[in-house]
Amino acid sequence: MEKPSAICTVHRLGMVTYEKAWKLQEALAVEVASRERSATLLLLEHPHTYTFGRRGQADHLLWDEAELTRRGVTVQWVDRGGDVTYHGPGQLVGYPLIPLATPGWQGERLPQMDYVGYLRKLETALVAAIARLGLATGTIPGLTGVWVQPDVASRCPRCDPALRQAPSKIASIGVKVDVRGVTRHGFALNVAPDMSYWQGIVACGLDGVQMVSLADLFETPPEMEQVQDCVVAGFGEVFGFDMVEEGFIIP
């Protein structure tokens, strides 16, 4: 008899401030850890926000306070891995809340193999999702995230010609696994954001990295809902979940 798939509940939340989404993750992670809630995937967009992870360096913020105010950007220092990244309208953000540890587990750190394995699965899920849109992407050993090879990235009309000989980054990943073994934070896929906001930071702490979006590479960019559909399908495929959509009202 075939074993039934585990369930992952999907909530599409629309535009949510970063602080509100952070607090929501905290509340839902407690329920996931106690098995009161199934694994959960939150899909949303943020207003213009720069977030610094645990490896973040203040000098990787290139705009001063006046420019941040003019552009309407807030800055958050958070507890995920990685350096600085950008979130904004037109970018699909996903926060998976998945119990990686067994019920009742209380540990200060998940085994490195399990943590890295989770990162690789996230990357694979995004690669599978983007492939459903008709675009080939991949990963780079030693670097986290999803990348577009130079021959594809060269389609980007606004990109710096000097950077077209190297892979370009289309999705960033920064995660945390809490003391209950539940994943937090997640990924950000550039669908059709205002890419000029990447100029305000050293993206992911990597000099000379070109960030691209789906809108840069498609003559007719996919709609956000279509991208969400592909992400849900790719996520379920790679993680072995039966993806169940539910409405949700943020308190």
Image: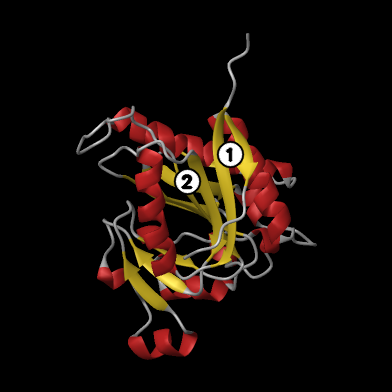
Vertical side of 242 occupied by 201: above or below:
below
Q: Would you say residue 206 is visible in this rendering?
A: no
Confirm or deny contact between disc 1 and disc 2 (CB under 8 A): yes
**In which quadrant of the rendered view does residue 128 lie?**
top right
Residue 133 x/y as whole percent: 73, 47
Residue 108 x/y as whole percent: 19, 39
Vertical side of 125 occupied by 63: above or below:
below
Q: Would you say residue 201 is visible in this rendering?
A: yes
| Residue matched to label 1 | 235
User: Which residue corresponds to the image point at 41% horizontal and 31% vertical from the top-left?
Assistant: 117
Numbered circle sitting on residue 96 = 2
Q: Secondary structure at mark 1?
A: helix
* Image color mode: secondary structure
User: Which residue corresponds to the image point at 59% horizontal and 73% vertical from the top-left?
Assistant: 194
Between 63 and 246, the residue placed more toward the observer is: 246
The CA span between labels 1 and 2 is 10 Å
User: Which residue corresponds to the image point at 43% horizontal and 45% vertical from the top-left?
Assistant: 144
Residue 88 x/y as whole percent: 53, 70
Q: Earlier in the sequence, mark 1 or mark 2?
A: 2
Question: What amino acid is at disc 1?
Answer: Phe
Between 11 and 233, the residue placed more toward the observer is: 11
Between 3 and 229, the residue placed more toward the observer is: 3
Q: Secondary structure at mark 2?
A: strand
Question: What amino acid is at disc 2?
Answer: Pro
**In which quadrant of the rendered view does residue 204 lie?**
bottom left
Between 213 and 162, the residue placed more toward the observer is: 213
Which image quadrant: the N terminus?
top right
**In which quadrant of the rendered view does residue 223 lie?**
bottom right
The 10 Å Cα crowd at callout 2, few under 14, some 14 to 19, many 20 or more, is many
Vertical side of 194 occupied by 145: above or below:
above
